Amino acid sequence: QKQIRRDSCASTFVQKRHKIHTPFVFKLISFNKLVTGFVNIPVRTNIRPHTSEMDRVPVQPKSYPTNLLQKDWTKRAIYERCGQAFVDKVHDMEVKDDDVWIVTLPKCGTTWMQELLWLVMNDFDFEAARNEHLEVRTPFLEFDFLIHKDLNRALAPVEALKSPRLIKSHMPLPLLPQQLWTKKPKLIYVYRNPKDYIVSRYYHVRSIGFGMSTTLEQFVLETLDEDADVPSEDFEHVAEFYELRNEPWIFYTSFERMKMNLRQVIEDICKFLNKTITEQQMEQMLKHLSFEEMKKNPKLNHHWEFEQIRAKHQTKHENHNFVRRGKAGGYKDELSSDIIAKMDERIQQNLDYYKLSLQKLLLLDENTPL
């Protein structure tokens, strides 16, 4: 029965993306199962080439965090560009008790929080932070495999870190290492208004040479079209962590809260990590983490990662700073009212599914305009 449900999820995915009739889809799945022993359908998302330079395939973790979330995981369809072999490797990786994990959707304030966390964990060593790229100090778990496609070295950047390690990932909750759910190291999750992070993603993908012929409004519409399921993949990503927000080892926050009161978030993080901070260190943090300082800091603008991506794909690109605007509500300056209305409708469909408001997901007062 579980296999049938997974096959059904895969067939629905292929049909939606490629408009293939049901009988053909199930024949494709059955043939693939005969050859490989499990469902593993390579899917290229042609709708959104600017984020799908690599195939996305349906994947399944070896086990689910049933000790934390009680849900029907057989209905949780998951698609990853890294593929099943990498998913299995991550599932089995060693998690250390003093690890700190930062998990987000892309362009939700990850870099901002990464730098904050690294400094708190490393006794506010600003000089060391200014002398080494952020992505070297705190590796992106999926990055090496996405670039090199070599399982033998896929986790090497993380494994080479000295403890305590700060590890970044965009993977959804069920694909994170199994030991996370038993050892329960510190984990920070940051969310952001989807209208802002979708706009931010547009400029990000153009910086690495994808979607160069796509306008911002086309990108938004294609994003809505691709993630048309309710709940969408992005909303499943955040909703699962939101449900765990009161776990003592999980710190859930938002980009908007950081914008409203960065000092308070820094204080909360220090308490969460059992660290102390002086007023002098706080003033240094507030300056170092300001948008103006981060925008001109080459160690925080992912130059190291961008060089590898551009070298691999040899694509033309635009030079948008990774730290571009750093503004909450900036989408209002760039999108038409019609496009915003379409985004609001899709967002509300997902919020209704979870019986939540966007303000709740962002930890804001219910009357806060978004």
Image (spheres, helix red, strand yellow):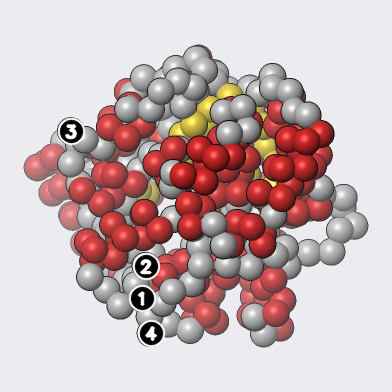
Q: Which residue is mark 2?
A: 208
As drawn, the label of residue 152 is: 3
Q: From this viewpoint, which residue is outermost toward the front?
A: 127
Gap between marks 2 and 1 measured at Cα: 6 Å
Of labels 2 and 3, earlier in sequence is: 3
Q: Nearer the viewer, mark 1 or mark 4?
A: 1
As drawn, the label of residue 213 is: 4
Gap between marks 4 and 3 measured at Cα: 36 Å
Q: Is residue 23 left or right of residue 135?
A: left
Gap between marks 4 and 2 measured at Cα: 13 Å
Q: Nearer the viewer, mark 1 or mark 3?
A: 1
The total number of labels drawn is 4
Three-letter amino acid code at disc 2? Ile
Image position, residue 244 (x, y; %): 65, 30
Q: Is residue 166 left or right of residue 245?
A: left
**Mark 2: which secondary structure?**
loop
Of labels 4 and 2, earlier in sequence is: 2
**Pointers 1 and 3 in contact (CB under 8 A)?**
no
